[in-house]
Each structure stands twice: as structure tokens, then as C-alpha cells.
Image (cartoon, rainbow, N blue to C red):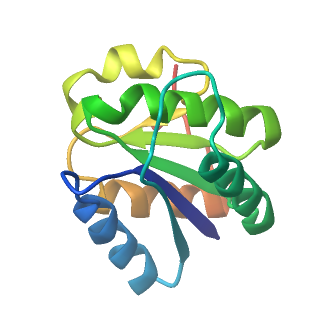
């Protein structure tokens, strides 16, 4: 199973949470990639980096795509999720500070299949295990 995290980041934002989750997934034998967008613009224009990240995602063919968002990057994450949904069928999960603060409004977006509230290390292991076994994901996604 392959998981790809996509983060909009700058010098004021760390992907430490994603790094923790990635470490746990790798320790359990999962393949994990991180794509970063240091520009992360939420306008309708698609940047070169966004195009390159979409191209890379198609090449990687992930089974799960994750976004860790803070409020400042949330609109950019939704923009990227929309672009991804047009091109790919992999489920998308949103986590991070913004999601933990407002999970109900985040899951209302039709491009967000699942949300993770709070710390994600144990939850993501349970989720990818379930996805790998093709078990019912009802407890993890929009009802």
C-alpha cells in the first residue's frame, strides 16, 4: 500500500505531524511519499509546482492521499484535492489543526473522503490496514 502526503509549507510551518505519521507507517512496512508546495496559492490559477505534484501523484498511483492542514493552508488544500479528484480515484483524508478544530465543516466538502481528528498515528494505521484488507471504511468516512 502506498500513501502520499501533500503539504503546503513555508518557513513558518513544519510538517512534523506528517513526519511522525510517515515514520509509523514506514515502520509497519507501508510506502510513504511526501509532496511539498512552498507556494500553496489558493487562487484558481494552477502553478507549475501544483502541475508537477499532480504529475508525480499520477506516477506514484497512491492508495491513499493525505493532507495535513492549518487554517492558513486550508483553501489551498481544498484546491489541490479538487484537482486530484478530477484526475484520480484514490481516497483523500484531511487531518491537522484546522480539521481538528472544524471537522464537521471539512467533511462537508465533496473532495474530502475522510477526516482525522487529533493525533493520527494510530488512526492512520487502522485506516490503511482496513483499506488494505478492503474492509468497510464506514467508521472513517462521511456518513
Front residue (pair 130, 102): 102
Q: What residue is at 34 percent from the left and 54 percent from the top?
A: 123
In the image, 137 versus 28, the foreground residue is 28
Q: Is residue 13 above or below residue 91?
A: below
Q: Is residue 51 left or right of residue 5?
A: right
| Residue depicted at x 34% and y 16% | 104
x and y percentages locating residue 110 in the rendered image: 60, 19
Q: Residue at x 59, y 35 (%)?
A: 81
Tally the marks: 0
Looking at the rendered image, the quarter that the N terminus falls into is bottom right
When asked about the image quadrant of residue 132, the answer is: bottom right
Residue 36, position as x, y percentages in the image: 47, 59
**For residue 115, above or below residue 51:** above
Residue 22 is situated, as x and y percent measured from the top left of the image, at 39, 71
Q: Can you say whether 4 is above or below 115 in the image?
A: below
- Give how far across and how far down residue 125 sits, in percent: 41, 64
Residue 141 shows in this picture: no
Residue drawn at x 35%, y 35% is: 73
Q: Is residue 63 above or below residue 27?
A: above
Amino acid at each position: 500500500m502506498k500513501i502520499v502526503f501533500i503539504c503546503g509549507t513555508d518557513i513558518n510551518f513544519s510538517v512534523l505531524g506528517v513526519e511522525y505519521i510517515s515514520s509509523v507507517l514506514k515502520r509497519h512496512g507501508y510506502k510513504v511519499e511526501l509532496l511539498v508546495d512552498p507556494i500553496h496559492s489558493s487562487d484558481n490559477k494552477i502553478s507549475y509546482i501544483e502541475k508537477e505534484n499532480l504529475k508525480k501523484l499520477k506516477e506514484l498511483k497512491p492508495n491513499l492521499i493525505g493532507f495535513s492542514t492549518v487554517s492558513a493552508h486550508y483553501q489551498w488544500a481544498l484546491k489541490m484535492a479538487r484537482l486530484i479528484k478530477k484526475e484520480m480515484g484514490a481516497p483523500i483524508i484531511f487531518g491537522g489543526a484546522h480539521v481538528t478544530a472544524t471537522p464537521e465543516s471539512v467533511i462537508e466538502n465533496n473532495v474530502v473522503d475522510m477526516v482525522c481528528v487529533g493525533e493520527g498515528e494510530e488512526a492512520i494505521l487502522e485506516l490503511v490496514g482496513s483499506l488494505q484488507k478492503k474492509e468497510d471504511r464506514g467508521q472513517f468516512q462521511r456518513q
